[in-house]
Amino acid sequence: MHQGRTTLSKFLIQQLKGSPEQNDLAALLVDIAACIKAISAMTSKGMLGDVLGSLDTTNVQGETQKKLDVLSNVAFINTFSMGGLVAGLASEEVDDPQEIDPRDGSGRFLAIFDPLDGSSNIDVNVSVGSIFSILRAPEGRTPTLDDYLRPGSVQLAAGYAIYGPATMMVITVGKGTHGFTLDREVGNFILTHPHIEIPADTSEFAINASNERFWEPPVQRYVTECKAGKNDVRGRDFNMRWIASMVAEVHRILMRGGVFMYPRDMKDPSKAGRLRLMYEANPMTMVVEQAGGLGSTGRSRILDISPEEIHQRVPVILGSRNEVERIERYHRDYDSGADQRYTSPLFQERSLFAN
Ligand code: AHG
Ligand code: MN
Ligand code: MN
């Protein structure tokens, strides 16, 4: 029987029927969709909306905040505070997790989010996004920090919005990864990309090549081989992209395959990587793995990491399965000493990179 267009709400009613927790999770995702519509409306106004430019404030990581970082953060906090479904939240733009006032409901969930990802792109009118991760809140007590610091494998739901030529929302509740496109005139998210599958093989990679001199040997090896093309070990030519919005890179990988890397490097040895585990790596890895891809640090599965801090950074290598497995193998070869080809003094001290 022809069922017509599937809105996000209809889809969630079908995917999440049964327990009260599932019903509440569906309601929460509908709330998040409303927040995403509000952020989409703000970003699309551009220069006409008085939303561009930077503030003179910095976040906990010392990054200058853009106006839209703060506006998007407020939109998410208001959504979760008023919706009655969330007991606590953590955000890239908030130093410590915040409890939601219990008067607003007995929320079952914890929400962790990057309200605006790729915000360096906002002033140049290039795609940005929002990323979210949903965990189970403890029952009958106030959440503590430890309730947030759970491995990504226990996420109940994860997803992102991309504010590009079209606004899309891509989500998973652990039953595949599905994409919805915003019909702006009507204000509904419509299921346009059911059961997204990332091809296992790819000839496209994404990495900030300006950091090349700081990379570890296994990453240098991988990229060198890709660039060497069809007359070298890979036997085919590769293409490269770098948008500087993780959301946009992951979205491209979901649509046509590819591998995205923000690996550990020696630029600032005190940082384990550029991206943040709780609100970038974990939710994006769940979305990618539910679409048949993989997410790794190069040395371990991202979703198996036991977090130590809300704003903790991790190396991220994710996308098409066979490429991620190859890069993991290059790390193993290097760590075991089987790969002797790189002898740069930068990388003589293996223990610098030991996990
Ligand atoms: P955010 O805007 O939330 O701080 O995240 C930006 C991240 C990520 O989206 C992107 O992949 C990376 O930073 C870009 O880093 P470079 O500036 O090194 O290109
Ligand atoms: Mn980000
Ligand atoms: Mn951000």
Image (tube, rainbow, N blue to C red):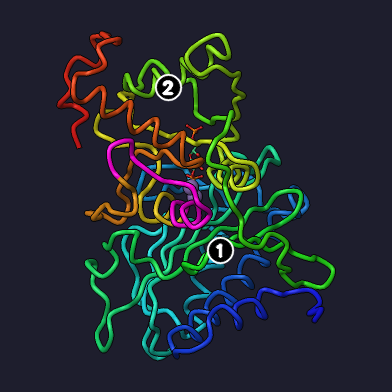
- Within the magenta stretch, is there residue 151? no
**Which residues, given as a range, are shown in magenta?**
284-300
Res. 330 visible in picture: yes
Q: Position of residue 36 (x, y in %)?
A: 63, 65
In the rendered view, tell whether residue 183 sits above or below residue 137: above
Which residue is pictured at 73% across the width and 68% down the height? 190
In the rendered view, tell whether residue 102 sits above or below residue 41: below
Q: Residues within 10 Å of mark 2 (few under 14, many from 20)?
A: some
Which residue, given by chain and number where applicable, does mark 2 sit on? 222
Which residue is pictured at 32% across the width and 22% down the height? 216
Q: Position of residue 181 (x, y in %)?
A: 72, 61
Residue 9 as seen in the image, left or right of residue 76? right
Q: Position of residue 113 (x, y in %)?
A: 45, 60
Classify mark 1: helix, strand or loop: strand
Which residue, given by chain and number where applicable, does mark 1 sit on? 171
Classify mark 2: helix, strand or loop: helix
- Within the magenta stretch, is there residue 296? yes
Give amino acid for label 1: Ile
Position of the N terminus by quadrant: bottom right
In the rendered view, tell whether residue 31 sits above or below residue 284: below
Mark sitting earlier along the chain (2/1): 1
Residue 227 as seen in the image, left or right of residue 57? right
Res. 54 visible in picture: no
Which residue is pictured at 25% across the width and 8% down the height? 343
Toward the viewer: 4 or 125?
A: 4
Q: Is mark 1 within 8 Å of ligand 2?
A: no
